[in-house]
Amino acid sequence: MSRPTQNDDIKTVQAVERALSLLEVLAKVGAPMTVTDLAEHTKLNISTVHRLLSTLIVRGFVEQEKTSSKYKLTMKMFEIGNAALYNTDIKTIARPFLEELVERCNETVNLAILDGSEVVYLDQIESTNMVIVKMFAKAGSRGPAHCTSTGKTLLAYLPDNLQDKLLAQLNLVQYTNETIVEIDKLKKELERVKQQGYAFDLGERDEGVRCVAAPVKNYEGEIVAAISASGPSSRITNYYLNNELVPLVLEIAGKISAKLGYNATKV
């Protein structure tokens, strides 16, 4: 077998760069695009874009809408993004801030990410309060996204097309009388979460448990995780929740985001 020439190496790298540029444009725009639009954004000719898209479709990264013939990203990109998150040391980065959070409020705190239609709890520090509650969430465990504060936070910030696809896959199990089990109501709840910047779980997963969660952002402003503080409803009163816990969780989420390179003034 002959060794590749230098020109072959350059062509191979160029093809990869061009394919990645298409994926980046589709991700940034966040909506289906025509071949012409993609060609304009990437400064590539239409025939090259066609060939690259054909390969990306075969590999499962891109799909073409039947009605509009436009192209969009598939769930495979989301899966790869989550896999990449596992390989970053976000747990180590967040740990001292989680410790600060539990020191300041003495409620159980969690760090979670979204994996498909579930949340995965990467880390947890339990409260030392005398009155504690049993919760399903433990480090390394999974939970439903539709009725947890971390899950709703992570769902709320997804691009619309990806959010719709995930919501269609959700199994809206009713755990308590407070659990949202209707898609339309859940969508309205997620809109509210995105507008205010944090999410509540007011006994939706576990009776008698109240939680508040806020998003963690990376250097590109993307939501890569969520942190939460949880406690019994007997202690987490409305006043305490809104006037003390919410600002505190937002503050700590902001500190973790800053550590990950997020700069609100540049986004």
Image (spheres, grey):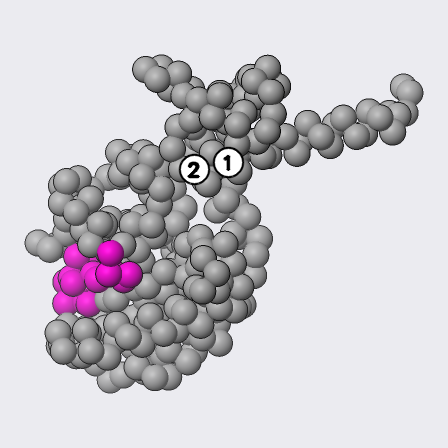
Seen at 14% across and 67% down, the residue is 208
Count of number-bearing discs? 2
**Quadrant of image for the C terminus:** bottom left
Residue type marked 1: Val
Callout 2–callout 1 Cβ contact below 8 Å: yes
- Which residue occupies the foreground of this view, 80 or 189? 189
Seen at 74% across and 27% down, the residue is 12
The correct choice, above or below, for 165 with respect to 210 in the image is: above
In the rendered structure, the answer to whether residue 260 lies left or right of residue 150 reads right
Residue 29 circle label: 2
Residue 119: image x %, image y %? Answer: 36, 51
Residue 25 circle label: 1
Seen at 11% across and 55% down, the residue is 178
Seen at 35% across and 42% down, the residue is 159
Secondary structure at badge 1 equals helix
Which stretch is magenta?
195-210
